[in-house]
Amino acid sequence: MDPITLAIIALAVIVVAIIIIVIVRTSQFGIEYEALPHIELPEADGESVAQRIGLATQLRTISDVDESKIDPRPFEAFRDLIRTLYPQLEEKLSRELINRHALLFTWRGKDESLDPVCFMAHQDVVPAVEGEEGDWKHPPFAGELVDGYVWGRGVLDCKGSLICILEAVNNLVKEGFQPERTIYLAFGHDEENSGVFGAKQIAKTLKERGVKLSFLLDEGGTITTGQIKGIAGPVAFVGISEKGHLTLKLKAKVQGGHSSMPPATTAIGALSLAIAALDSNPFPQNLEVAQFVISHLGNEVPFATRMALANTWLFGGMARKQLAASPSTNALTRTTAVPTVIRAGDAENVMPGEAEALLNCRIFPGETVQDVYERVRELVEDDVVLVEPVYGDTIMDDHAWNPTAVADIESPQYNRLADLVMGAFPGVKVAPFMMSGATDARYYNDICQNAFRFTPFFLTKEEVDTVHGVDERLSFVNAGKAVGFYQLLIEEVSSLTADQEAEGREGSIEERIDLSKAEMSAIERMKEPLVVKPLDPTKRKALGLVKEPVDPAATAVDVPEAVEWQESEQYIDDDAPLVVKPLKKKPEA
Ligand SMILES: [Zn+2]
């Protein structure tokens, strides 16, 4: 054979081999779950559950980063509302107040040698944006029941699940159920402001008491459609980890002056260039988490996407582009850094000497707070622009954290949760998910390996978008189903025997679950203490930015002892009216 024919044959063989490899890898990508028998949830009257959620909505339990600015009255009224609605709980559950408003209920299990389980939610809500209140179809703090929905701030985030959890426990108490394992209900009061005063203190209290949790469920993913481009069917996203968090301040400082004689470099100009540099240099992409999440969606995933993700050695570029094209999947592939606040200047003819922007970063597993800080400095810091912490003098504080540990999806706890979702919501796929946002659950890293973030609401994409927005609402159907779901889940996870638990507990977490390299390295890095490089002192001095160092002990939160929950004096008289107004039920439109 002549060399040309030989070369053509060799080329053809290579092409065929590549095609075979691509097809085989594509066919092996993804997990197809067996359809499970339909699970009938215990029945709950969704409309009456929604009514009670409506009452909770009327209390403006709004938190604040500054604890002294939190109005205690709505939180006191909220406790009284719980007491009024669920008097049976008092018979079986002990109640504690931790750090003023955080609530911890304990339902002692029959076998105290078994690790307890914990169900979480938060009492606080974000305010309805001023000026936007009028855009709501129904006022945000009225809790009206209209068109099969309860409307109001917090019905999805997260008073809805809080009330549904209480409702489920109350039903179980009434039925005479007694759990094998101790059950905690932990409701912090400042999740929307980082959870430092609520969830963090509850977790600390439990840790001090030597508690290790076998299972924890907090808010997080829901069942929804259209979250991942190309996936048509409904997916239950169960959060198993959270990205890290860091906000940095970019500060440009020059000599200010009259705008008629501007210097070559201005504060606003330099800051704008820095932001533009960050925009055009996004953090590097990593496909492993997206591969892991999408692999659980089986045949829901379009062939081309499966092929690209199963063969990143060949189609990596295409997959990266595809995933970067939508915000939700882009966040699954990288650390994101976005300017959220910008401040500079206040007169039309005065050139400000300072301009600053806040850069909010969500940190991908495998990277740390320090990595992100250093990369941002490398990209934008110069003689004019400085990168600084937002609060205090260190980068690593209550407002910054590394990506969390990853929950175990081969554990019996996860299996029971996933099976219940698939059985109770036929046709729904379950995908373990990395949360881009933060929840209170991250504070339980040390005391729980099986922390999941999921709320059993089946929401349209439009409903999901009302969280922190306008027209937040929850359907009666969702409210009723969620109560039944929590009831069964509480029974399932609290009855897990030591033997069943041990089955899923062989080897280290790294051995037991199929972690991607990025997740492994994130776990490794989280074991090391974080060293924060001090800001360059000479540069700081030259720019007049040297501050007195802050003594961390002086700013530490002083945590009062946990106390038995007392009724607030104001409402101690059972005949005294609650501050909540009776619900106005509007006629169906
Ligand atoms: Zn929330």
Image (tube, rainbow, N blue to C red):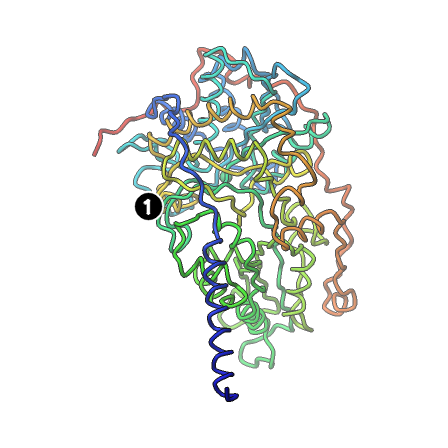
Q: Position of residue 578 (x, y in %)?
A: 44, 20
The residue most toward the front is 1
**Dividing the picture into quarters, in which one does residue 186 lie?**
top right
At label 1, the amino acid type is Asp
Q: Which residue is nearer to you in this view: 183 or 272?
A: 183
Residue 480 sits above or below residue 256 on the image:
above
The location of residue 195, given as percent across then percent down, is 60, 38
For residue 33, what is the image quadrant? top left
Q: Which residue is at 65% across, 73% downward?
A: 255
Q: Residue at x 34, y 25 (%)?
A: 46
Give whichever of 46, 16 is nearer the camera: 16
Whether 305 is drawn above or below 235: the answer is below
The foreground one among 579 and 560 is: 560
| 588 left or right of 405 in image | left
Circle 1: element type: helix
The x and y percentages for residue 207 are: 70, 30
Using residue 84 as the reference point, say whether residue 584 is left or right of it: left
Q: Quadrant of the C terminus?
A: top left
The residue to which callout 1 is attached is 135
Q: Label 1 neighbourhood size at 10 Å, few (<14), some (14-19), many (20+)?
A: few
Closest to the observer: 271 or 399? 399
Q: Quadrant of residue 439?
A: top right
Q: Residue at x 61, y 44 (%)?
A: 513
Residue 545 pos. (x, y %): 72, 63
Count of numbered circles in the view: 1
| Ligand 1 within 8 Å of the CB at mark 1 | no
Q: Is residue 461 left or right of residue 402?
A: left
